[in-house]
Structure formats: C-alpha cells, structure tokens
C-alpha cells in the first residue's frame, strides 16, 4: 500500500468495495451498480457472496484485500458504527476514496483521528453518507427560504416507534437516527449554534428520545425532536417540520413527501418528486464524481459531518 490514490482499471466505471453487507449496503449497491464495478466484503462471507451475485460483483476475502488491491479506487463503509472510524482511517491511509455511513464516528477522539488521516488529502477523499442532504425536498425548501424573510425559528421533528434488534440497539436514537435531522438543520442554518440544550425524556441509556434546543449567534432558535418510542403511522409519515421567518413559513413533511409555504398572501404546495425521495441516487452520483476527481468537495464532507456530530456530542455533554 503506497498511500497514493488507487489506479482505476476502468476509467468509466471505478471499482468500489462495499464493506459490510446489511440493509444499507444493499441500498448503496443498488445505486452504484450501474456506474461502478462492485466488490463486497463482510464478517459473513456468505452475505458477501450473496450480494456479489445479486449485483454482478465479486466477493473479497476481507477488508484488507480491499485496501491492498490497486484496482479498487474507493470503499463504501457500511459496517456497524464501532468500526467506522478505524476502517475510514485505514482506507484513507491506503489511498482510497471513502464513503462512510453516518455517523462517521462515535466520539470526538474518533473524529480527530479521521481528521488527522484526512489532513493533506484532497477534500473529495472522504464523503459521509448523509442522504438527507440530497433529498429533493431540501432543495425546494432552501429555494423558498428567501420568500419568508429573515429566519427566526426552526423545528425539525420525527417521533416514531422503532426497536432496532441489530447493532443499532447499543446506540442512542439521537446519534444513530437523530443525526439526520441535525444535518438537515445544519443545511438550513449553517454554522454551529452558540448554545445547545438537551432533554432525554425517556431517561434510558442509551436514550430512545431526544429533544434539543439550539440558539445561533444570529438569534435563530431551533429545535430537534427525535424519538424511537412514540406510537405513530409507519415510518413516521405525515409528521411536520417547519422553518419560520419574519414574513412567512415553510412547512415540510418530515420524510420529504411534500413541502408547502405561506408567504404574504400566497400559499404554495409541491409534492414529491418520488423518483429519488430519500436522496440515495443523488448521493451515489456525488460520491462517484469525487472518486473520479478527489479535488472536488462533495456536498456531505468531513467538515459538515464534524459540525453535526459536535452538536450531538454537546447534547450528550448536558446529561
């Protein structure tokens, strides 16, 4: 391993190794398969072989093979959270481009380790798989913000019932799921808040419900409400978040199904589009653009993910 960017044996279709073969790996593979040559590795060689057969790829002997192979230009890390940081560091040091599932780390120490591994490398060397930044609904929402005047108040919310039985059960709802809504808030407001207050109503450890109140230097006040212990419609559909300005309000279904705005005397409603409602296809395209040109900064980069994780860590600090 030289530490230099891996060679691309087929310039039109870079080779990408997917690490971990669970549900999210299947989502990424489905969006990458027509644009990249795929290889798979997992703790279960059987699951790696199954995905390789499904997506016309190859099964690797292990993570180390993905790092050692010069024809593999990039890795997509879809393993459990406790492996994200170490595998990201190893892949960067091997000269690979990296897509790591969110959250990219579970502590400030791990974030710092990733930052050191990324130092001096092109900004496109690392992308964090935060699909909420690629949802069509976010683009429409941001396009309508100028109509409602200076921002004053924001609430992003999703309260549903979810009982993870896999590795996610060992992590808090805010870190594992609420991070999506922290990222969404960051895409609307931008900088880190001046103050973070947090309440964890269920009292559990790890928590299954979190309520954050954020205050920004500009005076904007924001809330993040996220929980896994509230009865709701499947997937938490038909719950609403909003952005409020001096001259109006934009409301959006929290999954991105629709967006409507009220500014002045006008009301507008837009539904969908549903072709890439969750943003995974757009995210895959952004990743491959950065693989081909690491000097290009992806929309969901290290600094954006670091900012969002720091808000989560500050929330946990209040406990």
Image: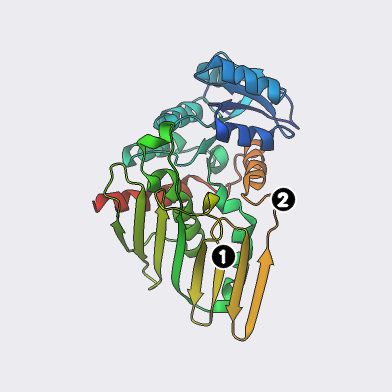
* Kind of element beneath mark 2: loop
- Identify the mark nearer the N-term, 1 or 2: 1
Q: CA distance from mark 1 to mark 2?
A: 18 Å
Mark 1: few/some/many CA within 10 Å (<14, 14-19, 20+): many
Q: Is residue 303 visible?
A: no
Picture quadrant of residue 16: top right
Which mark, by number, is residue 275? 2
- x 39%, y 36%: residue: 169
Locate residue 205, reporting x and y percent.
28, 42
The residue under label 1 is 252
189 vs 265, nearest the viewer: 265
| Residue furthest out toward the top | 61
| Residue furthest out toward the left | 319
Mark 2: few/some/many CA within 10 Å (<14, 14-19, 20+): few
Locate residue 319, reporting x and y percent.
23, 51
Tell me how many marks there are: 2
Q: Is residue 237 above or below residue 11?
A: below
Locate residue 307, reporting x and y percent.
41, 52
Picture quadrant of residue 237: bottom right
């Amino acid at each position: 391993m030289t530490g230099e960017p891996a060679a691309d044996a087929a310039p039109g279709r870079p080779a990408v190794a997917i690490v971990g073969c669970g549900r999210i790996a299947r989502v990424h593979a489905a969006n990458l398969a027509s644009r990249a040559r795929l290889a798979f590795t997992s703790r279960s060689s059987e699951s790696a072989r199954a995905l390789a057969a499904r997506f016309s790829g190859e099964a690797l002997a292990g993570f180390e093979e993905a790092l050692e192979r010069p024809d593999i230009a990039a890795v997509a890390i879809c393993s459990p959270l406790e492996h994200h940081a170490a595998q990201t560091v190893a892949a960067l040091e091997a000269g690979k481009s990296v897509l790591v599932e969110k959250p990219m780390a579970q502590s400030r120490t791990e974030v710092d380790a990733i930052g050191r591994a990324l130092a001096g490398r092109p900004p496109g060397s690392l992308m964090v798989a935060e699909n909420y930044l690629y949802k069509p609904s976010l683009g429409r929402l941001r396009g309508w913000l100028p109509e409602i005047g200076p921002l004053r108040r924001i609430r992003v919310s999703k309260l549903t019932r979810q009982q993870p039985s896999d590795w996610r059960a060992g992590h808090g709802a805010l870190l594992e799921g609420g991070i999506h809504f922290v990222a969404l808030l960051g895409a609307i407001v931008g900088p880190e808040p001046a103050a973070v207050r947090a309440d964890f109503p269920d009292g559990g450890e790890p928590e299954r419900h979190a309520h954050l109140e954020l205050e920004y230097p500009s005076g904007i006040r924001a809330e993040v409400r996220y929980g896994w212990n509230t009865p709701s419609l499947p997937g938490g559909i038909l719950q609403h978040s909003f952005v409020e300005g001096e001259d109006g309000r934009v409301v959006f279904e929290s999954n991105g199904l629709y967006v409507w705005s009220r500014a002045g005397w006008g009301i507008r409603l837009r539904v969908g589009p549903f072709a890439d409602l969750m943003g995974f296809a757009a995210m895959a395209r952004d990743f491959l653009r950065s693989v081909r040109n690491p000097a290009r900064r992806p929309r969901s980069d290290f600094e954006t993910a670091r900012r969002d994780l720091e808000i989560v860590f500050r929330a946990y600090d209040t406990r």
